Image (tube, coloured by chain):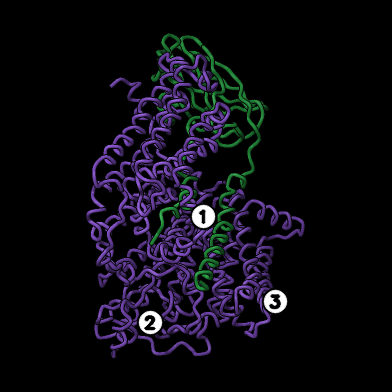
Amino acid sequence: MDPVAEAVLASWTLDLKLVCLLLAVAALYLRGWLCLRIELPRTYTTGKLIVFAGGLFTVLVALASPVDVFGGLLLEAHMIQHLLLIMLAPPLLLLGQPVLPLFRGLPRWVFKDALGPFLGWRELKQIGRAMVHPVVSWFALAAAIIVWHLPRLYELGLHSQAWHRAEHACFFWAAVAFWWPVIGVWPSHPAWPRWAMIPYLVAADLVNTGLSAVLCFSDHVIYSSYQLAPRLWGISALDDQSAAGAIMWVPGSIVFLVPAVILGMRALEPGRASIIRPLPRVKNPRVLPKVPWDLLRTPILGPIFRYRYFRRCVQAAMLLLAAAIVFDGFFGPQVAPMNLAGVLPWTHWRGLAVIALLMAGNLFCMACPFTLPRDLARKFAPPRYRWPRQLRSKWIAAGLLAAYLWAYEAFSLWDSPRSTAWIILGYFIAALAVDSVFKGASFCKYVCPIGQFHFVHALVSPLQVKVREPAVCGSCRTHDCIRGNHRQRGCELNLFQPKKLGNFDCTFCLDCVQACPQQNVGILRVLPGASLREDRPSSGIGRLNRRPDVAAIVLILVFGAFVNAAGMTEPVMLWMHQWHSRLGLSSMVPLVTALYAAGLLIVPTMLVAACGWFSLRWSQTNSAWKELTCSFALTLVPVGFAMWLAHFSNHLVAGWSTAIPVFERFFSQVSSGTFPQASFPQAWMPSWLPSLELIFLDLGLLLTLYAAWRVAHRFADGERMALTVVSPWAALACALFAAGFWIVFQPMQMRGMMMMH
Amino acid sequence: MPKPKLLWPVAIILAQTLAWADGGAVQLREEAGPFVITVFTAPAPLSAGPVDISLLLQNRNGLEPVLDASVSLILRDPSGAEIPARLTREQAQNKLLYAAPVTLAKSGKWQLDITILKNGERTSAKGTIDVAPAPEMTASYWSYIAFPPFTIMAFVVRERLIRRRKKG
């Protein structure tokens, strides 16, 4: 092939956002179409699927193919792009009768709870009906075509990306409205008789013809940008303009006139005067199953997770990895970016753990290597004692969590492979020591600070280890899920499945799944954050919203997220160093201690106490301050989790590749004793990373506000009172969101990579 | 039963991401040796920060695109500091162009020194580009700030609709 032609055909601009959007729409349509094909096989034929897919492909061609790339150099390419967006993509999409399949393709709760109220909104229906009324839609398309081809506005589109987008959006949506009454998209009530669509189309063609004629016969170049643009293959700007006019004229007229002819022929056929017919009523609509999606019943992952020794295999792999990290931490180079202990725990493990919490649930505890040695030890020496009653709370874990977050910054743990190795080793010893003496998973439930991190944040995870059919548990007398049986132990954290709410204290060990003789426990999909607003007691936990120890852990984690992330930003580091030199301190530890005491303990306590006080005072409710404050403190989990996600995903994305040279060095050193020349990994900061972090923060804030709003209804009668109760907490959540927004845009110390971003 | 007209709010949101732009602005057009050189920059208007510089090389006779040259560029900021860049077709979206991503640290007038090597022959061209100050970073992320209030408004409307339906 000619190299120039090859280069032209290779000029695609596949934008990730566009491709994802088109794929998502295609997936929605396909999902809905698969349901409707069973219910209405004569209406939702394969042909509908094909034309809809063709419409999406046309949009892709218009916006990502060489047609788009050369639009800035050749008016004729730009004209083809506009023709695709106005005359081909909209009718193809509408011929696929997309309304019903797209709605049916949505998740049930989105359709019913989120969109449902809007679908019955009378005013919105009237606006929608007006938009697709033939008079409005005809003038809308005519205006869009004429106005955007005025030289000043056309030039605006050529020089500004935002205006160019606006131009394309106007063309596309005006064309959707224009073709709507022509095609008779279901369910719509035709405002005009079918024959009236013939003059409607012919009149639109007249506008198109007039504009085409201006372009074809003009004796000067109308759009000056094309005069300035380099001329390809010697085509003059005037010839290019005439060709563009011809493209608009001939194929454009065909697209308008062919449907007019078809409509005319159909109108002359007896008995086909009214083409839009109501869809037949579905006799036996396919009722969507009420049982939510279950990970354990999926084709590939299900059998893997159900495999009895799956957890042991994952734990063993993690144990090997932990051993390698500890070994390298003690005996490898004490340079964090070149040591497994400086890279894997702080860059990769933390990032993957929070992503697992976001996408699934508490997978870290499932794969926890620390409990494997203690399980082995228990085979030989089973523990005798129960955890002391006085210590059955989260206060010890809360103290350890605060100490851990403080030590991380005060002693720069991320920068010290040896300290990291000591922490991991200490963890193994602590788990072994505690659980050798005390029964059950006492270490996990009452001591482990990392476990608490995962327990709290799993409250916003989309999956939960849960009973599939509650009625089955009603007839169960053995309660194997908690008591265990001869082949499988029961839940070590005392979570009785039929009475368990949410993921708190659940390690995803799947012991209950294996123990249940009815196979009635699964990993089911739940609404993220639903358990944050529960006011019911849960097995082994009690009421979460009445436990100050749980509220303390939540607050340490929420405020810790922001303090921890802020600690690595340039302004905070500079500020710390200024105070360090001003006070003449020999170490940064006192300053870090002061910062963490203020950030994790004093400020959160004061803010939360004040919010609780204002809520009670303004609303004049009779509720107890403790219950109210603990309930609302729980609702802050999503915004805190969003900050952890933004922070750790930043490290993970930027330092993903750092594991490769570190492993190379480790294996080289272990196998041959040689130390290859160190090559410090480069950070990769993609342009989409800040956007991703901001999306996390946005969603975190919204989930917090929603949960708080729902909790407020428990303490208030009526909307106005609820608004008063929630307002201090909403203000606190917004302040945290603003702090997160500020942190995302600060220059950061790229820990583990020896460079500043 | 869902009504088709109610796709409009979804449609408006989708439209934000559906459309996107093409190439940048012409910064320089010059005839040098056997070539016609056109330099484009994106974004338009050009501002400090990460930018895309692309170059179209054409034969002076017939204006056929030249695809087998080696193109390099030196960008000189107002203080005289230099940024070298090698422009390649692989880095360009339009495969008739040679392009490279560059970060312009400062605003002001930047000098361009273009060097083209083809069949052992060297051709040079010079030019200047005006670079505006970098836009406020948060300004380019306004939609992320606007998203929560927009969603809250939609939620308020939803709650009112539910209440109205209950009353009705």
Against A88, residue A392 (above or below) is below
Q: Which residue is mark 2?
A: A492
- Can residue A654 be seen from the camera position used here? no
In the picture, measured across the screen, residue A646 lies left or right of residue A255, that is right
> Looking at the picture, how far across and down is residue A207, in whole percent?
45, 30
The residue that label 1 is drawn on is: A695
The three-letter code of the residue at mark 3 reads Trp
Amino acid under disc 2: Glu
Residue A331 or residue A58, whichever sits in front: A58
Disc 2 + disc 1, Cβ < 8 Å: no
Question: Could you tell which of marks 1 and 3 lies nearer the N-terminus?
Answer: 3
On screen, residue B74 above or below B164: above
Are marks 1 and 3 in one subunit? yes
The colour assigned to chain A within the rendered structure: purple
- Residue sitting at x 42%, y 51%: A659
Name the amino acid, label 1. Ile
Residue A209 lies, in percent from the top left, at 43, 26
Please name which of the two marks, 1 or 3, marks the residue nearer to the observer.
3
- Residue topped by disc 3: A618
Name chain B's colour.
green
**Between discs 2 and 1, the one toward the N terminus:** 2
The chain identifier of the residue carrying mark 2 reads A
